[in-house]
Image (cartoon, rainbow, N blue to C red):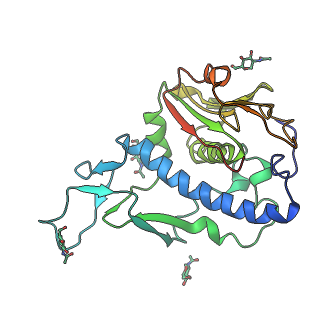
Amino acid sequence: MAKKSNLSPQFSGTTVDIRRSFQSLIALLAAALVVGAVYLTAESGYLVQEDDENVVQRRSTGNESSENTRCDLFSGKWVYDNESYPLYKDYECKFMSDQLACGKFGRKDLDYQHWRWQPHHCDLPRFNATALLERLRNKRLVFVGDSLNRGQWVSMVCLLEKAIPPRLKYMHNNGSSLITFKAKEYNAKIEFYWAPLLVESNSDDPVNHRLPDRIIRAQAIEKHARHWTDANILIFNTFRW
Ligand SMILES: *[C@@H]1O[C@H](CO)[C@@H](O)[C@H](O)[C@H]1NC(C)=O
Ligand SMILES: *[C@@H]1O[C@H](CO)[C@@H](O)[C@H](O)[C@H]1NC(C)=O
Ligand SMILES: *[C@@H]1O[C@H](CO)[C@@H](O)[C@H](O)[C@H]1NC(C)=O
Ligand SMILES: *[C@@H]1O[C@H](CO)[C@@H](O)[C@H](O)[C@H]1NC(C)=O
C-alpha cells in the first residue's frame, strides 16, 4: 500500500480552501461517476437509444406517440435517494484511500452521498458491477489526471470490487505513476495514471509535486501517453492546476 498521506498533497494552497475544495470535489466525483458509468454501460455516447431496455428505460409521460425516440442523458436533475444510494461505503472498501474515507474517520453528515442523477425522459438502470465487469472483460480502462481522477478511479474500483471474490482481485502500485487494479477472472484492468497536467510537467512525480511554480511542456505528452496507448477506454481530467 502507498504511504498514508494527510490531505491531498497537491492541495498545497491555503488550508482554509481545503474543506470547500473537498466538498466540491466530492460533488464532482459523484456527478462524473454517474455520467462515466452511463457511458460505460451504454457505450453509445451522448444520446442513448431508448430501444435497448437494458440500457435505459423510457419513462411513461403520457405523450408516447410524439416523444423523441432518444433520451438526452444530460437533461435531468439530482434527486435525493436515501434508499438505494450510496452504492458503496468507504469503510467497506479496502482499496479506498484514507484521504477520501470520510465515513471511516467519523464524518456524520453523509447525506451528500445520496444524490442520484435522474434524466428527465428516461430512467438509468441501477449500477450493476457484474454487468460492467462483463463489459470490461479483456479490457483496460485508464483514468489519467490528478487527484480528482484518482478519486474517480478508486470510487470505480470500490463500485466493482464488491462483486469480485478476494483472491480474484488485486491492486498493484509499483511506485511509478501507474496504479493498477485487476479483476483476474475478467482479465480487466482499471488503472490510474498520475499526469496532473496531462502533458509533461514538473509535477509529474506522483509523490513529490508540491512546487511553488508549475512548468509544463505544452506540446509534450508522449512520455505519459506511451503508458496508455493500448487502453480501451480513457478518462482524462485536470483540475485546478
Ligand atoms: C408532447 O411532445 C411534444 C413533442 O415533443 C411536445 O411539444 C409537447 O409539449 C408534449 N406534450 C406534453 C403534454 O408533454
Ligand atoms: C428518506 O428521506 C425521507 C425524506 O427526507 C425521510 O422521510 C425518510 O425517513 C428517509 N428514509 C430513510 C430510510 O432514511
Ligand atoms: C447484473 O448483471 C448480470 C450480468 O449481466 C445479470 O446476470 C444480473 O441479473 C444483473 N443483476 C441485476 C440485479 O440486475
Ligand atoms: C512500474 O510499472 C511501469 C508501468 O507498467 C513500468 O514501466 C515500470 O518499469 C515498473 N517499475 C518497476 C520498478 O517495476
The reply, left or right, for residue 17 in relation to residue 51 is right
- Residue 74 seen in render: yes
Nearest to the observer: residue 37 or residue 203: 203
- Residue 75 sits above or below residue 216 on the image: below
Q: Quadrant of residue 64?
A: bottom left
The reply, left or right, for residue 124 in relation to residue 29 is left
Percent of width and height locating residue 32: 54, 52
Nearest to the observer: residue 197 or residue 185: 197
- Residue 230 sits above or below residue 183 on the image: above
Percent of width and height locating residue 56: 32, 54
- Residue 106 sits above or below residue 229 on the image: below
In the orientation shown, which residue stands out farthest toward the left?
65
Q: Quadrant of residue 174?
A: top right
The reply, left or right, for residue 3 in relation to residue 64 is right
Nearest to the observer: residue 62 or residue 226: 226
The reply, left or right, for residue 7 in relation to residue 31 is right
- The structure residue drawn at horizontal position 68% and vertical position 43%, both measured from the top left corner, is 150
